Image (cartoon, helix red, strand yellow):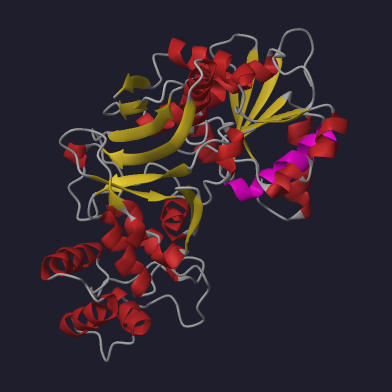
Amino acid sequence: MSSSNTKHILLLEAGAVARPCAEYITRRPENVLTVACRTLKSAEALANGLRNTTATVLDAGSEDPEKRAALEKAIAEHDLVISLIPYSYHPNVIKAAIKGQTNVVTTSYISPAIRELEDEIKKAGIVVMNEIGLDPGVDHLYAVKVVDEVHAKGGKVKEFYSFCGGLPAPECAGNPLGYKFSWFPRGNLLVHLNSATYLAGGKEVHIPGKDLMNSAKPYPIVDGLSFVAFPNRSSLPFRDIYQIPEAETVVRGSVRYAGFPEFVNALVAIGMLNPTPQPWLKDGLTWAEITEHTTGAAETSEETLIARVKALCQFPSEEGSTRVISGLKWIGIFSSDKAEIRYGNLLDTLCARLEPLMKFNKGERDFVILQHKFVVKWADGNTNTITSTLEAYGEPNGHSAMARYVGVPCGIAVQFVLDGFFKAPGIYAPHTKEICDPLRAQVEAEGMGLVEKVL
């Protein structure tokens, strides 16, 4: 722990969104930052050029006793730990933080596993601040704002829609999927397999994961661009979180360019997104051999494989079939290329194939789109629609929009915790006006935020 005004911060993960967070934190001369990753090279790359910053090696996801002990020791030596690692590892970090009486900030949702630690968190006297990236994060700041303003004027939010997407900018979306990875590819793909539940016209609607992409519908946000939107996980808690018990429709979800869901459906149909280890999936296999096995094709010729894929996918139109098959050819699943087998399962092996194909190249930029839509009924009986919209582009050869809109709000929240904004220990997220208003003011001071319109 620190003495005097110096604050020691530990940043776990050196991934795509970490640099803007680190830059924000190190603006303050009293902040001393340690960047930790599983490899020293990654940590050093992130720390390079930042003042008061050093790099080290830690593995927050490991069950190895020595590595767990190293994590606990490092966390105890800091005033605050930022966990940007996959959300399933946050409880490991928080348990170590409880032992070390160290505050925590994450950009992920408050999971049941985190909630179970609430009593221990309070006894340790620490703050665990969550859900402060883009989605979740900036989305909360503006949803809470509009709902509060509507209620203050006597209105009721009858319908609430919120859709977000991290996409390549239109001029960079030339691959057959119209998509590139601006964050963890595995998690990115799995989003498209989650079951979803939402409220529509006062009734709960449940969509199994296998049908999620079939539920995608055209959703206009920006003139000249064709988007589709689909629900994500459960939207039901947000009626309570945003304090809109009057809402009859509550839907939160994701946005992609039109045509993308059909590719995901095809990959599901032929078994390529299966995360279960397969005993037969061994080094030395070609992609054609893998596709032969997953589809049950008679042999590995491209013609035979394509015929089998068409039989499994049951494409609704010849045009759609042609487009998806050409995309699968581009991925290379019918080729004689040797596959990089990763973790013995098809999902991670496919990720190894897609990562170089679908990465952002030098000079390319990403595009973040986020829109809330509120259908409001006023006391006089009139109804109108309020939108709150973010359109943000990354900087060519600079920070991506995704990195900026996740990393900077996270950095702001870190500073709030260090400055003593939260007066009592416990688990926090930006769900209330008292937390959202000052956070949003700082986000806007960075030239970021959403634009509201009344339609």
Residue drawn 12% across the image and 71% down it: 318
* Residue 192, image quadrant: bottom left
The answer to whether residue 98 is magenta is yes
Please say if 376 is above or below 41. above
Q: Quick one: 233 or 44, which is closer to the camera?
A: 233
Image location (x, y in percent) of residue 209: 46, 63
Residue drawn 27% across the image and 55% down it: 260
Residue drawn 22% across the image and 55% down it: 259
Q: Quick one: 164 or 196, which is closer to the camera?
A: 196
Q: Residue furthest right?
A: 123
Please say if 197 is above or below 446. below
Horizontal side of 247 relative to 76 (left or right) equals left
Specify the segment rendered in magenta. Answer: 86-100
Decide if residue 51 is in sight here.
Answer: no
Image location (x, y in percent) of residue 369: 33, 34
Please say if 93 is above or below 327. above
Q: The C terminus lies in which quarter of the figure?
A: top left
Decide if residue 306 is in sight here.
Answer: yes
Image location (x, y in percent) of residue 368: 34, 34
Q: The N terminus lies in which quarter of the figure?
A: top right
Horizontal side of 247 relative to 166 (left or right) equals right
The answer to whether residue 62 is magenta is no
* Residue 53, image quadrant: top right
Horizontal side of 420 relative to 212 (left or right) equals right
Horizontal side of 378 relative to 68 (left or right) equals left
Residue drawn 46% across the image and 25% down it: 20
Q: Main secondary structure of the magenta part?
A: helix
